[in-house]
Amino acid sequence: MDAVERANTERQKRWVKDQKVGEGTYAVVYRGREFATGRKVAIKKIKVGQFKDGLDMSAIREVKYLRELHHQNVIELLDVFSSKTNLNLVLEFLDSDLEKIIKDRTLVFLPADIKAWMAMTFRGLEFCHRNFVLHRDLKPNNLLIASDGQLKIADFGLARDFTDPGHKMTCQVITRWYRPPELLFGSRYYSTAVDIWSVGCIFAELMLRTPYLPGETDMDQLKTIFRALGTPTEEDWPGHTKLPDYVPVGQFPRTPLRDLFTAATTDTLNLLSKCLIYEPRKRIGAKEALHHAYFFALPYPSHPSKLPKLSNNTSSRPLDEVDGNVDMNASGPGVKASAPNRLKRKLSSPGDELGGRPLARRLDFTQKRS
């Protein structure tokens, strides 16, 4: 046994698989633990034998990018080892995801809760983009929630770097409901704006408590987008009719976001609209989004430990804690505007200022709510 095999054997002995918690075409996920400490982990076993040419490219990508990305809002890769014909990724254990939380109708979302989830998503994404990594599959199911409430971006199987802007990339990425129109029209040259569109769809879903743009086919997806946001013109989106897979989809008038998100604040709708701009170059960036007025207005983002959790893990927020800012009608947008949303906190020290605006203290998630 050579040194590499010995090292792999030692790593393999460090981890114990306890229970299978999920399975896909190419991977099985187990709940596991560290043998010495009992620390809970998730072990993702990639079925290498499924691939004619060896290891699945998505597994290589996931290992590559998670080894490079270390951030509070990105899932942590703890170890990698091989076993027979399988590759095993040891990840930090996260027992919930945003999709499950959105679907749990026993939970009540406050405007501050949605703001916290959005802040953590943008923070994690800004770190990825700052390190030239596109995620290319952002959706609520891939935003995992830790026991302390921290949101972590996960599943980097479709991620890739974008250091060369002239390099062709596939348009067959991002789950359809969260896929931007440029990819649906076959664009092979794109950048961070594709992830921002996905975040905009997630933002809308948090308010609606149901997917915002659920198309059944790629063509239906385009129609769904255009029905919601209007058919783009050359003025809205120069050059889109020249994209490889462009086809006329029909003329739909633009419906103001306010008509659907009747209870959202002006700042909320402004940020949402900037995530869903047709022209990719005009879409807001993750860093710019974190400086948007939405995050500087009351209510400040909830502390992660105060966010709603699945009712089978812990009791949901009692209804007597709801202060009237929430629309209890499940078919509505779920968030009512409140007058304090227009207020801004006064600076208490020069260190509170960022980019010329007072930065809400609640963006510092290392501190408990006072």
Image (tube, rainbow, N blue to C red):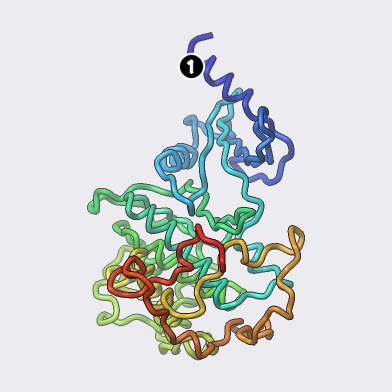
> Where does the image place residue 303, in percent across and percent down from the top left?
56, 65
Q: Nearer the viewer, residue 32 or 163?
A: 32
Name above or below for residue 108 compared with residue 91. Answer: below
Name above or below for residue 207 compared with residue 243. Answer: below
Mark 1 = which residue?
Answer: 4
- In this orientation, does residue 247 appear? no
Quick one: quadrant of the N terminus? top right
Q: Residue furthest front?
A: 349
- Among the 4 quarters of the image, the one containing residue 101: bottom right
Q: Nearer the viewer, residue 178 or 9?
A: 9
> Where does the image place residue 288, in percent across and percent down from the top left?
33, 68
In the image, taking residue 183 as reference, residue 304 lies left or right, namely: right
Residue name at image x 38 percent, y 68 percent: 290
Mark 1 secondary-structure assignment: helix
Residue name at image x 34 percent, y 60 percent: 192
> Where does the image place residue 188, in percent across and percent down from the top left?
32, 57
- In this orientation, does residue 253 appear? yes
Quick one: quadrant of the C terminus? bottom right
